[in-house]
Image (cartoon, rainbow, N blue to C red):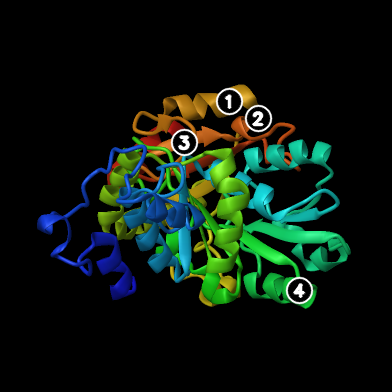
Amino acid sequence: MFDEKDVLTCIGSDADASEYHGSILPPIAQASLFRKSSAKELHESLKRENKDFVYSRGTNPTVKVLEERLAALERGEACKCFASGIAAISAVFMGLLKAGDHILFINNIYGPTIQLAEMLDSFGITHTSVLGDEITGFEDLIRPETALIYFESPGTMLFDLVPIAEIVSAARKRGILTCIDNSVSTPLFQKPLNLGVDLVVHSCTKYIGGHSDVVGGALITNNDLLERIFFRSYLLLGGIMSPHDAWLMLRGLMSLPNRLKQVQADALEIAKFLDSHPGIRKVHHPLIESNPLLDEQMTGHTGLFSAEIDVKGFDELCGFVDRLELFGKAVSWGGVESLVIPSFGFDDESNPTPLPTNLVRFSIGLEGAETLISDLESALE
């Protein structure tokens, strides 16, 4: 199911056993600064703060271990970790764009990302959005001033896939950068850099952390782009990941392959059950219907999907959600516990188009498919 190299990277089995006295995880370098042996050494280190340990706002030993593993998983040259996923996205926008530039968003984009883009309007950076099911004409929306095409595939609510290779080809012909939020698939199920994408961002809060106890983000790209972002926005915005949070992410990464293996199987079984249930109008799951993009871009899917419930209004939708006993009512996803959220959490001005009002998103955890199906059956009665 997974590349053997990726499994070893997640666990850290391929790490040098002589480092850190043989400890499985690196020590937490809880330090704000790092002393040098001479003034000249400090002077030289300040010139390459993206590589040397000077001040933890720039580079930290514990965080660097996580960055190296995430870069390896995504087949990227370099990675920087952030305090949140939106901090990583902010660094991309602020580090690469200027007044007069234009961003083209493709697919149903995470609401706060669109809110950030709307804020950038006041700085002279404009944007346009095209939905996943309207992708055919996306090239018509590319402008002479378009500097970045930003997309999600799959999206985080309707899980539409968009043609990554086609987007990359259109962008490269025009000298436009591409960036994808790969949080839904994780590096284990999709490697956008191998498909030609320039930048990959992650909300590490989700599957990478995996235990709903830490918030973080990551950016993986080539050395040149990362250095540009590091000095132009990463250092200046200060949205850094703490050493302790990086350590928690490394711990979560160790179980990522096994967690994804179970939630993929359980989520698909549950999605198929709902797809055949008379109380469900439609299920949105990439593996339910045949799609040629699956084989081109992905090797599997995680525990996320959504469904349109056969209800007459908002109160009935909330009633269904409230009858679920084993699904936590909460935002986010990717932990070991199952979660559910109705579309009201996203159907607002931050979303370029209203989602179906009867939509609920499920994040399947580790409780087991049969147990969760029983809970769903009771709630649908």
Q: Which quadrant holds residue 71? A: bottom left
User: Of callouts 4 and 2, which one flags the residue occurring earlier in the amino acid sequence?
Assistant: 4
Q: Residue at x 29, y 66 (%)?
A: 9
Q: Residue furthest top?
A: 315
What whole-number distance in Å separates the C-alpha atoms at marks 1 and 4? 44 Å
What whole-number distance in Å separates the C-alpha atoms at marks 2 and 3? 19 Å
Please tell me the numbered disc located at residue 340.
3
Q: Amino acid at mark 2?
A: Lys
Q: Which of labels 1 and 4 is toward the front? A: 4
User: Of callouts 1 and 3, which one flags the residue occurring earlier in the amino acid sequence?
Assistant: 1
Q: Which of labels 4 and 3 is toward the front? A: 4
Horizontal side, residue 136 vs residue 242: left or right: right
What whole-number distance in Å separates the C-alpha atoms at marks 4 and 2? 42 Å
Q: Are marks 1 and 2 in contact (CB under 8 Å)?
A: yes
Please tell me the numbered disc located at residue 312.
2
The residue that disc 1 covers is 316
Q: Amino acid at mark 1?
A: Glu
Horizontal side, residue 146 vs residue 212: left or right: right
Q: Can see residue 310?
A: yes
